[in-house]
Image (cartoon, grey):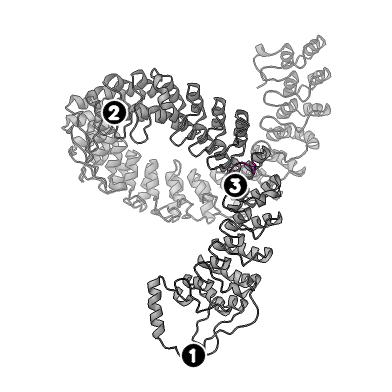
Amino acid sequence: VLHVNSVFQSPLVQAIFSRNAEEVTFLLDHNEDVHSLDQEQSTPLHAAAYLGDVHTMDLLISSGANVSAKDHGLLTPLHRAAASRNERAVELLLKHGAEVNTRDKFWHTPLHMAAAKWATGCALALIPHVCSLDVADRSGRTPLHHAAHSGHGEMVNLLLNKGANVSAKDKKERQAIHWAAYFGHMEVVKLLVSHCADVTCKDKRGYTPLHAAAASGQLDVVKYLLRLVVETDEPNVFGNTALHMACHTGQDAVATELVNCGAHINQPNHHGSTPLHLAAASSSGVLCLELLINNGADVNVQSKDRRKIMIYSPLHMAAMHGRFTGSQILIQNGGEIDCVDMYGNSPLHVAARYGQELLISTLLTNGADKARQGIHGMLPLHLAALYGFPDCCRKLLSNAGFDINIPDDYGRTCLHAAASGGNIDCLNLLLNSAAELDVKDNLGRSPLHYAAANGNSQCTIYLVRAGAEVNELDLTGCSPLHYAAASHTFCGCLDYLLDNGANPTLKNSKGYSAVHYAAAYGNKQHLELVSEEVESNIPVSPLHLAAYYGHCEALRLLSETLVSLDVRDVEGRTALHLAARRGFAPCVEVLLKHQASYTLKEHKRKWTALHAAAAEGQMDCLLLLVNGEQSSIFFIVCRTALMLAALGRHTDCVHILLEKGAKADAADKKGFTALHRAAMLGSEDCVSALLEHGASALCRDSQGRTPLHLTASLGHTELLRSLLKAAMKADPLDSILDYRGYTPTHWAAYHGHEGCLHILLENKLFSNQEGNLFTPLHCALVNGHDVAAGLLVKTVGPQIVHVSDAKGRTPLHAAAHSGNVAGLQLVLAQGAEVNAVDHCGCSALMVAADCGETMAVEFLLHKAKPDLTLVDVNNNTALHLACSKGHEMCALLILGEISDSSLINATNSALQMPLHIAARKGLATVVQVLLSRGAAVMALDEEGHTPALACAPNKNVADCLALILSTMKPFPPRESGTGTPSHFNPILKNCGIAAPCGSSGNLCHVSGYCTVDAIKSTF
């Protein structure tokens, strides 16, 4: 490698390679550059080290040569010297401080070089200086790997004696013994074993040294390993044993040794293949095949996958790979001729599929069934014809003995298969063997349909000449011409069909003619041939299909042929609309060049092509549309186009539209601008583009909301910062209120976005004097965001907790409404008045009771000691409200804190006591507690009903119930033990009452009242 053409060498290097020490000395004395580099970036010292010329090396080093210089491959002079086995050169370089652990581009150190090149002396000189004997190259191989690979026993012995790790693994987890075994280095294998190498070790794929030796036919190594009593049938990760490997590579001597040592000859691998399968498939496996059969291998064993599904027999494998001799051996030894695989294919099917003519002859000679149906019900002849093997077809047709028109499961005959495959010789053989032309498959397709569909022009010609009907329709109404038009390449089928009477106006069941198919598949030449129907637009025009699939050349032809390019589909879309939406810029360009209009709108969303391109972010199409000659209509449709581009986060499209004059603040019917949409989506790039082009951050929708409101609502923190900066610059005095008086601060607080709230509060965008009296603190608490509430209290001050909204509700009311205990704690800690009432007379406790917020009720009762006598405008107490909404647990908690017996019988404006309401709502436990606390059972409400009659669903029912009760006699006392225990019994006990007891069923009153903690403990 170093000794390149002298034309490219310096005089100094030429002198070194000539071994002319006097010339070298002369040149060095006359200042010849000792650091000069050749094409490989090698120095003169590299050359001298390669040659092992110690004297010249000494001269060069004395003249300042760099002993650790690296060439293009990162090789140093020390690498060169070690690779050339020049011991004295190595010693000289080491003496002058050469870097011994340096690596080349493959991470080889000089010791790797020495180990690979049998340079024992060099290795001896290097070893005392290396950092590790087990340093790995890029493949993970140590010097010991290289020595074992090269088979140098002396080097291996040296490295092992110096402490090299005998079990070191490369990146494929192969040890030195793997390499020695594979290359048949017997002495090295023995040496490694004597140093405790693991003869059963496996690499990443599970190969042992026995696998390696067996695969490469190293008989002596195999014998040696077997004498060490290694496991003969140990599988690798694929399930292959050493016998599998030997049979696969045709190593008959190794296979014999393994069989003699008891290897399992029928053991399957993970694909279900036995050694016999692999021998049958091997190009050199005949002797192995005979060996296995002679030793009792099952010739008809079928490989099975992990699902236990039959796959192939050995005869299938021989047929697939064309192993003529192997197939004869298998058949002679009882191989079943017509055995089938998981798809129903016999070996004859497999031989036909892979074109194995000799195998077919052998199988037929031995009685293989030509009429057996395999995969999808196909004959072997189907497969030979489909894959284009005329010699195989000829063999199968000779003395046929079966009906060649037998259809497969899909109704296809062998002639269908030949027409599809496109081999004219196979087709002729079948036609000459009386194959029927007019047979149709299950979809009504003739062989001519298949030939045309696959662009097989010669087959098409022969079939038409043989009398095939060119206008035959399949079950979908398609003729061969339809399929020929759909071909991607111009093959002559369509031209020939037209010349022979094919009708281009025929339409299939969906209304498509051949021209539609040609347009959809973009074949310009086919379009030219069937251009009579280009004006058809049912269900869509050919122009639409060409545009939708992006066939520019086909579209150009149609554009030049059609009178109008503005034909619409059933949804009102033009071809320009489809091309723009799909992003086919060349198609858009062609249509615009031929004066296609983009003012036309589709029916549903009233979008033009411009809208479609903007909505889908098709920038190139958008540029073509806005730069077109019809730019005068741009402003008519551009407003929505800009909004759609922003809605799709298509920043490039937004820039294009704005640069072409789109109004940044144009709004839709709801007042939403493009900036509103971009802000909602959190699209920073689109927002930046809009702001750069003058979009107002203070523009308001129909509800007065600015983009800042939406951004704060959705928590887009950085976007809010940008919009806020733009808003302050536009109008510092704008309080940014929507039409209900809410600021972005309200929105951020309501949704609990602390980051946005922090930014807004930093900019002092909150004032108690401006905006809705339902403050941001109300908003945060009513939605349960106590962290956001804490931030507001900390920033604004404790006075905010006393602010009432237009209905007189304080933040404490809001927290009670949401049941947010942390929020209640927060505002109470800031001095909120627990008994403050709103304009309806409701306190926070009454709100919590009305909403059924059990935890809030419990907290207020236990920690804040609210006034339970407070009544609302209808004279309802908290107990009334809890009962009226059916909140049983809240009512029980309140009852547990009532010490004033007058509250038990307190009446509201309708003269209803809590007992009336609880009875009406079916709150049995509450009724039971009220009765135990002395509730008046005969008190009348404004309708004259007692609590018992209040249970009636309406007044008429109550009157009837009163009449019935007045005529009834008292019931005798119940027998004891008939009462059903209630699941509320523990609560009742804590509320100061007991369950019915004794024979009378009366309630036994016990002293004391329930507590909140006692009730809580029952959950």
Instruction: Give the residue pinned by disc 3.
Output: 773
Q: CA distance from mark 2 to mark 1?
A: 91 Å
Q: Which numbered disc, 1 or 3, marks the residue closer to the eye?
A: 3
From the viewer's perspective, is 33 left or right of 603? right
Region rendered in magenta: 766-774
From the viewer's perspective, is 1001 left or right of 194? left
The structure residue drawn at horizontal position 44% and vertical position 71%, both measured from the top left corner, is 943
In terms of depth relative to the viewer, which is nearer, 280 or 707?
Answer: 707
Disc 2 crowd, CA 10 A, few/some/many (<14, 14-19, 20+): many
Instruction: Give the residue pinned by disc 2.
Output: 542
Using the rendered image of the protein, determine whether residue 518 is visible from the camera's viewpoint: no
Check disc 1 and report its element: helix, strand or loop.
loop
Q: Amino acid at mark 1?
A: Glu
Q: Which numbered disc, 2 or 1, marks the residue closer to the eye?
A: 1
If the image is split into quadrants, where does the C terminus sit? bottom right
Q: Amino acid at mark 3?
A: Leu
Check disc 3 and report its element: helix, strand or loop.
loop
Residue 765 at what x, y percent from top left?
64, 39
Give the mark nearer the N terminus: 1 vs 3.
3
Using the rendered image of the protein, determine whether residue 347 is visible from the camera's viewpoint: yes
Check disc 2 and report its element: helix, strand or loop.
helix
Place residue 613 in its image quadrant.
top left
Residue 300 at what x, y percent from top left?
38, 54
Instruction: Give the residue pinned by disc 1.
Output: 975
Q: Which numbered disc, 3 or 2, marks the residue closer to the eye?
A: 3
Disc 1 crowd, CA 10 A, few/some/many (<14, 14-19, 20+): few
Query: Mark 1–mark 3 contact, CB under 8 Å?
Result: no
Residue 471 at what x, y percent from top left?
18, 33
Q: CA distance from mark 1 to mark 3?
A: 63 Å
Q: Is residue 180 magenta?
A: no
From the viewer's perspective, is 114 left or right of 500? right
